[in-house]
Image (tube, rainbow, N blue to C red):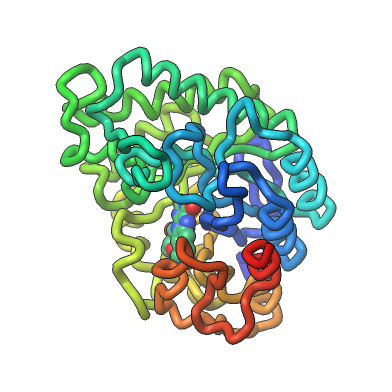
Amino acid sequence: MELLWQPGKIGPMDVKNRVVRSATNEHLSEPNGDFTQAWVDTQVELAAHEVGLVITGHICVDRTQRNDIGQPAIDRATDPALLRQAAERVHAYGGKLVMQLSHTGIKAPEAVNGRPPKGPADFTAEELDQLTENFVFAAKLCRDCGFDGVQIHHAHGYLLSEFLNPEENTRTDEYGGSLENRFRLPGQIIRAVKEACGPEFAVLVKMNSNGCGDLPGALRLFEESGVDAIEVSGVDFAGRPGVKEPFYLKDLLAAREGIRTPLILVGGMFSRETAEQVLAQGIDFAAFCRALICQPDFAARMKRGEESACLACNGCYRVYRQRGVRCVQHAEPIPQLEKLFST
Ligand SMILES: Cc1cc2nc3c(=O)[nH]c(=O)nc-3n(C[C@H](O)[C@H](O)[C@H](O)COP(=O)(O)O)c2cc1C
């Protein structure tokens, strides 16, 4: 019996299979950060082709600190109509929809935002409380628009991953130093979001297997904070072009002892066989990013036994901020992107 197509559970969320679309910055906002129809269509297309859980690209909870000109922001200026539409249409295909919420931290270019980026040391305690409020506001809006949950982004060098990283978090107050202190802000945000959104709304996190200082300790703290699932990636995910094996599996297997929270692994999976091997080791969900950039219907193809056409070349990562062709191997641009960039 194949594990990939078995239903799974993430907190209150019943997921029809074990296939997750790992968050992928769609680069599909209006220049001011508003959501677009093309962004909605991208989520729906994945659900229409067998992705059980669609996690959106990272959405910035502070419009003044976006990662790039195509990254959506979520705040009081966000029009809920497109978000509602996204949730309804993903649900119509039997999929679940989770928004990844993020603060860009030191990776927010001044050229995009007109102001310098902010790392952990640049926030006052009041600003950290405001940031927590921003995450809470965004999560409540997602819940009210019919999303199934949010994933709070703690990976890849963005702000919350910097807080966890002992080398990047230089604070000397209660938010820096020991793992417990570095976890104070993530824990504060998770608890506030959970309290505001209630038990019927899933709260997930994505974290680095490396770059957090202490993977077993961080997994434990996330579990104690009550998250519904932990997705494990790595700070260096873009540094392994051509590698088609689950490159964070070993670290996760070594660190997960005693963890009962559902685990999602991402990184280097491009085939049904590999994903099955990962699930067979007790990982609950298999997440895919580049395979689904290359072929948004990859999950359906995988179900039919097809291999991914993705070369894992990382071309998509290099070009996606510059132009609307996501997979550099595609002769044809992805239609939604073509439409957006031609207007
Ligand atoms: C073009 C591109 C955009 C990405 N955007 C995000 C993002 O918004 N949030 C996130 O957590 N990870 C993002 N990632 C990382 C992926 O989710 C994933 O962790 C990584 O690509 C490894 O998975 P893969 O081997 O299946 O591609 C992005 C990766 C690529 C290539």
Which residue is located at x 39 percent, y 55 percent?
233
Residue 113, above or below 231? above
Q: Is residue 82 visible?
A: yes
2 or 211, nearer to the observer: 211
Q: Position of residue 222 (x, y in %)?
A: 40, 34
Residue 277, above or below 330? above
| 262 sits to left or right of 300 | left
277 or 44, nearer to the observer: 44
Q: Position of residue 27 (x, y in %)?
A: 55, 56
- Quadrant assignment for the C terminus: bottom right
Which residue is located at x 37 percent, y 47 percent?
111
| 27 sits to left or right of 141 | left
210 or 280, nearer to the observer: 210
Q: How many marks?
A: 0
Q: Is residue 160 visible?
A: no
Check the image and name the residue furthest to the top: 126
| 120 sits to left or right of 64 | left
Which residue is located at x 42 percent, y 75 percent?
315
- Quadrant assignment for the N terminus: bottom right
Q: Position of residue 270 (x, y in %)?
A: 50, 75
- Residue 140 location, quadrant: top right
Which residue is located at x 66 percent, y 67 percent?
342
| 14 sits to left or right of 135 | right
